[in-house]
Amino acid sequence: MTNPYPDLERTEGDRNSPAERFERLREELRDRFIGIEIDSSPGNPYGVPRDAHSVVTRHLVDEPGHPTRAALDRVLGFFRERLAVA
């Protein structure tokens, strides 16, 4: 069965989307939830700001291999899959 819920993304330091929210979604939705968590710890290898929130828009780094680009690709893939006309 395909996942009927959208991917959600957050960074580790994102106060707008706390880890507890993702944990609750995982508990409630189990395998129907896919969460994308991006390292925003100090000194992280990709330079993602600690307070990054909009990692598929405002904080997107549009470079191959960057975790924010990978998150965007997953979100766009979800929309393509769900909105495709049969």
Image (cartoon, rainbow, N blue to C red):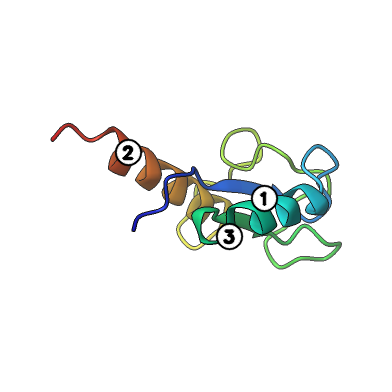
Q: Secondary structure at mark 3?
A: helix
Left or right of residue 19, residue 10 in this image: left
Q: Amino acid at mark 1?
A: Leu
Q: CA distance from mark 3 to mark 2?
A: 19 Å
Q: Nearer the viewer, residue 80 or 72?
A: 80
Which badge, 3 or 1, comes first in the chain's sequence? Answer: 1
Above or below, comparing residue 39 to residue 10 in the picture: below
Q: x%, y% of residue 37?
A: 66, 58
- Identify the residue position indicated by label 3 in the image: 30
Q: Nearer the viewer, residue 59 or 9?
A: 9
Q: Position of residue 45 (x, y in %)?
A: 71, 68
Q: Residue furthest left?
A: 86
The residue singled out by tag 2 in the image is 82
How many neighbours does mark 3 have within 10 angstroms: few (below 14), some (14-19), or many (20 or more)? few
In-front residue for pair 31/76: 31
Helix, strand or loop at disc 2? helix
